[in-house]
Amino acid sequence: MNGGWEEEITHTLALLMVLASLSILAQSQFRGLIRALAAQGWLLAGTLAWQGFARGSPVPLLAAALAASFNGAWMPLWLSGLAHRLSAPETVPSAIGFQGNMLFGLGAVGLAIGALRVPVHSSSLPAGFDFALAVSIILMGLLVLTSRRHGLAQTAGFVAAQNGLILALIGLPGALPALILQAALSALSALMAGGIGLFRIPGELNAADHFPRDHWRTSPEAAKESSVTVPPAG
C-alpha cells in the first residue's frame, strides 16, 4: 500500500472501528451492545478485505472472510440466542457508569495515538496511526470485559478486544501468523460463549444481585410462632 487514497480508506475504516468501540462502551442495553459488536465485526472484515485488495495478498482476504462469518455474523447471533434462551437481563450496566466509559474510551484513543505515533519518518506514520487505533480498540474491549457484570457482555468485550488485536497484527509483515492467531482467538471466544450456555450460569451471572439476601433469615415474629412453650410441671 503505497499511499494516497488507499491509505485514506484504510484510516477511515480503522476510525469507524474506533467509533464502534465507543458505541459498545456507551450501550446499557444488551441488544444495542450486540448490534455495535456486529457492526465492528463487519468493519473489521471490510478493513481486512481492503488491505488484501491493496496489497494483492490472499492472507488478509482469508482473514476478512473469517471476520465476516464469525465476528460479524455468528458470534452476535449466538450471543443474542443465548441471552434469549437464558432469559438474561436486558440491562448491562457498567461498574464505572456512562461518563467513566466515555472518558476512558477517549483517553485510550488519545493515549495510544500519542504513545505510538512516533515521527521517525513520514512513511512510518500511517502504519503507526493505524496500529495506535488498533491498540485503543483493544483497551476499550478490555474495559467492557472487566467492567460489566453481565457474562454475555463480558464475552462481547473479549470479542471486541480480539477485533482490535487482529487489526493490529494483520498490518504487520508476515500476516499468516496473525491469521492463525485469529482462528485460535475465534475458537476461544466460541468456547467462552458456549460455556455460558452449557453450564447455564444462574441468572446470567447476575442473579445474586436480585436474590433477596434475607430470604433465609427468620424474622422475630416467625421465631416466636415456631417456638414451643413447655408448660411448667405441675
Image (spheres, grey):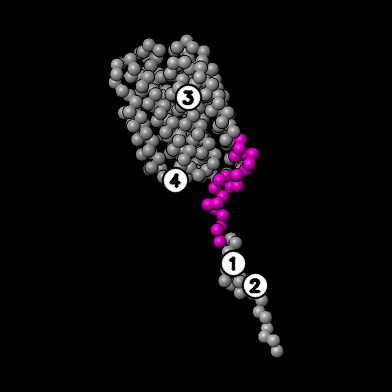
Residues at marks 1 and 2 touching, judged by CB atoms closer than 8 Å: yes
Residue at mark 4: 95
Q: Which residue shows up at 42% across the image and 33% down it?
A: 139
**Would residue 228 be found to the left or right of residue 160 on screen?**
right
Tell me residue 117's x, y (percent).
32, 24
Residue at mark 2: 226
Q: Which residues are magenta?
A: 194-214
Badge 2 amino acid? Ser
**Would residue 101 be found to the left or right of residue 153 on screen?**
left
Residue at mark 3: 166
Badge 1 amino acid? Thr
Residue 232 position (above or below residue 132): below
Tell me residue 111's x, y (percent).
34, 32
Q: Which residue shows up at 41% across the image and 24% down it?
A: 14
Q: How many marks?
A: 4
Spatial CA span between label 4 and label 3: 27 Å
User: Within the magenta stretch, is there residue 116?
Assistant: no
Residue 28 can be seen in this image = no
Residue at mark 1: 218
